[in-house]
């Protein structure tokens, strides 16, 4: 690894001297905030930078989950010419750190008091080897249950607070002639439902052991088998048209009153808002059944690449400072449906779902229950995550596979993926 | 007979060109073709064979997110062999490849024979059958995804006619989903096979058929015993083209099933892409790419061998 570090570093240095197209005090930011609201929000950051006299070079790469953007970033890094900042999240920050490509933000972090400002769990993700290398942009909550109140009323059910209530409510909704749970059969959506069900049935401590620490005893144990069985039961609540369906189409089923519930992260709120609905009235949000005391987070962050030029470095530091500034945090998160990464902001502009999200975020950060989302690449490395996805989605779609076998495969997935 | 087939001609030109070249007098004339060809030779040497070699080297390393040169021997290959999803993908390729090639050949040759009966509006019909080939696999995939969706497509339509118990939900069934890929791919490619066969049929000397008729052979018998054997080279070309479409299939899977349900319709190409580019396992992805290359070579080498040998004899 050390020889690799040296070669990549040498490449990076060689590339930095080649990259003469950017002005010294410009920052080039690679991101995939390309949808309408997101792009406007990213523009706020650009204006803030320009107001302080720095240049902003936009490097937006479209493509939902950022796969395309990551491919572009890798090829830029390989050719020794990485952008100054890039949208990298979760354990991937550690991988880029290991390659020795990231620069530190300790000066800004000290000046702005990030240690006090950010919850410890969040700060940990932003640090590599004890140094701040990335700045959090927002916090998404993944364990949400969305509902259409009209459907619930027609079926005569309340928002469920436990998994058993969810299954009961689901039956009533089915009898009333609706689809109980809207879902799209894509691996990441399967995994999103799986982690919420696991969290709801087995609690955040078990979640931490199994899906974050990858403890083989937890992964193959009784509790995992129980969680897998609960997960399989949710399939009975879904409709047969789900294979390959995109998540926003599933959200539209809730909006249109075809389906009662959806288990999805708070980006779903963007769809409800775009349809002109108001939180708490036209649609309901609640923590996924059984997870009121837990919070699975999915944090977008900007990681800073190592630069040699002092002016560029200064611009980078300014970028990091501005990202956490209230102006940007508010504008960006209102557009994105998430909550600010700093918990000390005035939330009066935000809707009731976001306010509840922030309250739960602060509470779980103090009392425990704040856990990274496995399904959204916050908990484990990409290869392990992929192997777990394979097991989860295969088990979910295979009517004959017993939960015990899936649990065994889960253990070997966590082992085999690491090399 | 053989040279009258259009496919043969096009594939034979680059190979045959070397033999036919006349001896030039001036040295510039001798060198000019080589000079002009040199850049493209160099570029394909580097970008095709160079990168193949690089992929092979990477498949021997522990590369994860970015290429590294920490060699682990054939470790990635043994991981691949232990990977259940790889076996699903390989089995799928066998099922998909065999069914796709066979069904395309059967449907394509039947269509060609029927069109060959000197019917009216043959040109229009031929265009209709050939048209799916003009679409990209992405379009085919999306259209068939809707047609096969039990709540939108064929099943919903037949049920709305009153056949409530009708079920056609293969795309939601992990055991059957691979056959939906075959359906869509056959729909796309069989018209093309038809065109190949039609060209072949037109090249057959009428007098052979007439002779068979004089001998009292029935029409099916003429086609089966006389015409089809004459079309062997066409079958061969068609199999080659279809086989490599099958091995390269990627876009169809992405558009039609996304590899799902679960990973039931994964093919080696989608496996390779997922591991090398989204799962930060470049080493494992390269190993799977090398095995795919092996699969292609297993088909290509016998083909080239027979091509070159027949040229020598011919």
Image (cartoon, coloured by chain):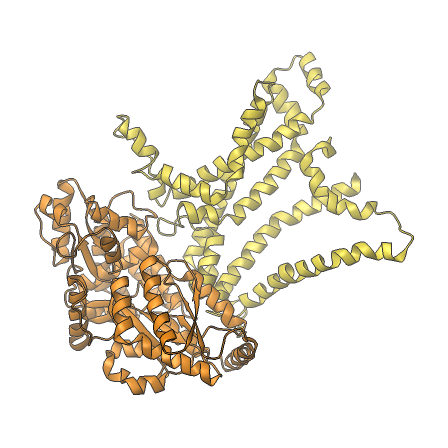
Apparent side of residue A141 relative to residue B245 in the rendered image (left or right): left
Using the image, determine if residue A36 lies above or below residue B149.
below
Quadrant in which residue A200 is drawn: bottom left
Judging depth in this view, the residue of A284 and B196 nearest the camera is: A284
Using the image, determine if residue B58 lies above or below residue A159.
below
Using the image, determine if residue A383 lies above or below residue A263.
below
Which tint is chain B? yellow
Q: Residue at x 26, y 58 (%)?
A: A194
Judging depth in this view, the residue of B148 and B223 nearest the camera is: B148
Apparent side of residue A238 relative to residue B30 in the rendered image (left or right): left
Q: Residue at x 83, y 57 (%)?
A: B31
Quadrant in which residue A127 is drawn: bottom left
- From the top left corner, tell me how far across and down residue A270 is, in percent: 26, 57
Using the image, determine if residue B117 lies above or below residue A243.
above
Residue lying furthest left: A156
User: What is the number of callouts on the image?
Assistant: 0
Q: Residue at x 32, y 84 (%)?
A: A109
Apparent side of residue A280 relative to residue B301 in the rendered image (left or right): left
Judging depth in this view, the residue of A339 and B303 nearest the camera is: A339
Residue A299 in view? yes
Q: Residue at x 61, y 18 (%)?
A: B118
Which tint is chain A? orange
Q: Quadrant of the C terminus of chain A?
A: bottom left
- From the top left corner, tell me how far across and down residue B204 is, in percent: 69, 25
- From the top left corner, tell me how far across and down residue A210 is, in percent: 27, 68
Residue A218 in view? no
Judging depth in this view, the residue of A375 and A36 nearest the camera is: A36
């Amino acid at each position: 690894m050390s020889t690799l570090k040296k070669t990549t570093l040498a490449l990076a240095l060689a590339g930095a001297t080649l990259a003469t197209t950017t002005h010294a005090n410009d920052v080039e930011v690679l991101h995939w905030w390309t949808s309408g609201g997101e792009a406007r929000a990213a523009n706020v950051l650009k204006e803030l930078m320009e107001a302080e006299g720095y240049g902003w070079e936009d490097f937006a790469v479209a493509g939902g989950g950022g796969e395309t953007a990551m491919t572009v970033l890798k090829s830029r890094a390989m050719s020794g010419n990485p952008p100054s900042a890039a949208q990298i999240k979760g354990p991937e920050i550690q991988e880029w750190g290991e390659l020795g490509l990231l620069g530190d933000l300790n000066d800004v972090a000290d000046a702005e008091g990030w240690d006090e400002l950010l919850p410890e769990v969040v700060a940990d993700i932003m640090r590599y080897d004890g140094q701040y290398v990335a700045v959090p942009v927002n916090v998404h909550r993944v364990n949400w249950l969305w509902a259409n109140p009209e459907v619930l009323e027609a079926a005569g059910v309340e928002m469920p607070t436990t998994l058993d209530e969810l299954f009961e409510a689901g039956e009533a909704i089915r009898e009333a002639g609706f689809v109980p749970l809207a879902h799209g059969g894509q691996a990441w959506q399967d995994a999103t439902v799986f982690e919420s069900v696991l969290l709801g049935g087995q609690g955040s401590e078990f979640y931490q052991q199994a899906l974050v620490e990858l403890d083989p005893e937890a992964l193959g144990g009784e509790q995992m088998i129980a969680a897998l069985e609960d997960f399989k039961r949710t399939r009975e609540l879904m409709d047969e048209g789900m294979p390959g369906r995109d998540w926003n189409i599933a959200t539209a089923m809730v909006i249109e009153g075809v389906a009662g519930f959806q288990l999805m992260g708070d980006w779903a709120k963007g769809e409800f808002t775009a349809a002109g609905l108001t939180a708490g009235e036209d649609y309901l949000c609640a923590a996924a059944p059984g997870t009121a005391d837990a919070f699975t987070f999915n944090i977008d962050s900007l990681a800073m690449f190592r630069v040699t030029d002092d002016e560029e470095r200064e611009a980078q530091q300014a970028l990091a400072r501005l990202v956490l500034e209230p102006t940007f945090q508010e504008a960006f998160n209102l557009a994105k449906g998430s909550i600010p990464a700093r918990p000390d902001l005035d939330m009066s502009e935000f809707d009731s779902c976001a306010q509840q999200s922030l309250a739960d975020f602060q509470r779980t950060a103090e009392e425990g229950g704040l856990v990274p989302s496995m399904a959204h690449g916050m908990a484990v490395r990409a290869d392990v995550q992929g192997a777990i996805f394979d097991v989860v989605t295969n088990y979910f779609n295979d009517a004959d596979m017993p939960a015990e076998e899936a649990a065994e495969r889960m253990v070997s997935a966590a082992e085999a993926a690491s090399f | 007979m053989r040279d009258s087939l259009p496919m043969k001609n096009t594939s034979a030109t680059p190979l045959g060109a070397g033999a036919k070249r006349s001896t030039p007098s001036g040295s510039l004339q001798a060198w000019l073709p080589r000079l002009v060809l040199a850049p493209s030779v160099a570029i394909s040497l580097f970008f095709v064979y160079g990168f193949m070699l690089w992929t092979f080297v990477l498949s021997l390393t522990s590369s994860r997110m970015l290429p590294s040169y920490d060699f682990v021997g054939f470790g990635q290959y043994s991981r691949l062999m232990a990977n259940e999803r790889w076996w699903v993908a390989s089995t799928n390729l066998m099922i998909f490849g065999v069914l796709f090639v066979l069904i395309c050949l059967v449907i394509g040759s039947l269509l060609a024979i029927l069109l060959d009966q000197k019917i009216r509006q043959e040109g229009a019909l031929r265009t209709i059958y050939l048209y799916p080939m003009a679409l990209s696999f992405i379009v085919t995939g999306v259209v068939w995804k809707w047609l096969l969706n039990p709540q939108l497509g064929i099943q919903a339509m037949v049920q709305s006619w009153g056949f409530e118990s009708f079920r056609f939900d293969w795309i939601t069934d992990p055991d059957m989903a691979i056959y939906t890929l075959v359906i869509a791919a056959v729909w796309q490619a069989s018209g093309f096979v038809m065109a190949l066969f039609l060209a072949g049929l037109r090249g057959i000397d009428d007098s052979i058929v007439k002779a068979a008729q004089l001998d009292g052979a029935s029409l099916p018998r003429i086609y089966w015993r006389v015409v089809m054997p004459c079309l062997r080279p066409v079958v061969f070309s068609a199999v080659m083209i279809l086989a490599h479409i099958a091995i390269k299939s990627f876009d169809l899977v992405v558009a039609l099933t996304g590899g799902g349900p679960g990973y039931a319709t994964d093919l080696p190409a989608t496996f390779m892409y997922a591991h090398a580019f989204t799962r930060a396992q470049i080493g494992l992805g390269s190993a799977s790419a090398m095995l795919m290359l092996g699969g292609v070579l297993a088909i290509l080498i016998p083909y080239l061998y027979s091509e070159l040998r027949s040229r020598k004899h011919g």
